[in-house]
Amino acid sequence: MNSQIDGLESPEERELRETLGTALATAQEHLEQNGGFMPFAVTLADDGEFRLVFVTPGEPDDEGNVDTGSMLADILELLSQGRDGYRAVAMASDVILPEHGSDGIHAAAEHRSGGLMAAVVPYVRTAEGFTFGAAEADGHERAVWVD
């Protein structure tokens, strides 16, 4: 059966969607509780458990900014090293969305069987907290299972 026709997802598609959803929800939770978040990853291990992966940020520059690109590279390295124990992974980061005039949560997930899924969720800070836009599909290339 073709999952695109009958509306049913394969186990891999479900795992990919759940891993991506967990990353997006965790990022939203961190924003609401802490006012921001550093890049992180979510893994779906072979035992079916979701786990968070964080790395320690480097020293801030003279303007107080942390090199999040370096943090994402470190997370990617950790995911690549441990990939034999994961069914799916997702990386999440805070991004600027000029086309929306806002910030956003970007998350990209990949499954060891070959599936890819990425999304961006625009958000704005309001007096009451945060307002999140609808998730929009985004492009992504494989980064963990590349060889």
Image (cartoon, rainbow, N blue to C red):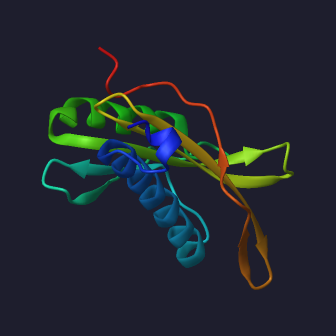
- Residue 50, percent across and down? 27, 59
Disc count in the image? 0
Question: Which residue is at a point 64% across and 48% down the rendered structure image?
Answer: 120
- Residue furthest to the bottom in view is 128
Question: Which residue is at a point 30% across and 47% down the rendered structure image?
Answer: 11
Q: Is 32 above or below relative to 65? A: below
* Quadrant showing the C terminus: top left
- Residue 53, percent across and down? 31, 51
Q: In terms of depth relative to the viewer, which is nearer, 6 or 118?
A: 6
Q: Is 143 above or below relative to 65? A: above
Q: In terms of depth relative to the viewer, which is nearer, 132 or 60?
A: 132
Q: Image check: 1 left or right of 37?
A: left
Q: Is 54 above or below relative to 75? A: below
Residue 64 visible, this orientation: no
Question: Which residue is at a point 83% across and 43% down the rendered structure image?
Answer: 98
Which quarter of the figure has residue 35?
bottom right
Q: Is 40 above or below relative to 82? A: below
- Residue 1, percent across and down? 38, 37
Q: Image check: 11 left or right of 7?
A: left
- Residue 47, percent across and down? 13, 54
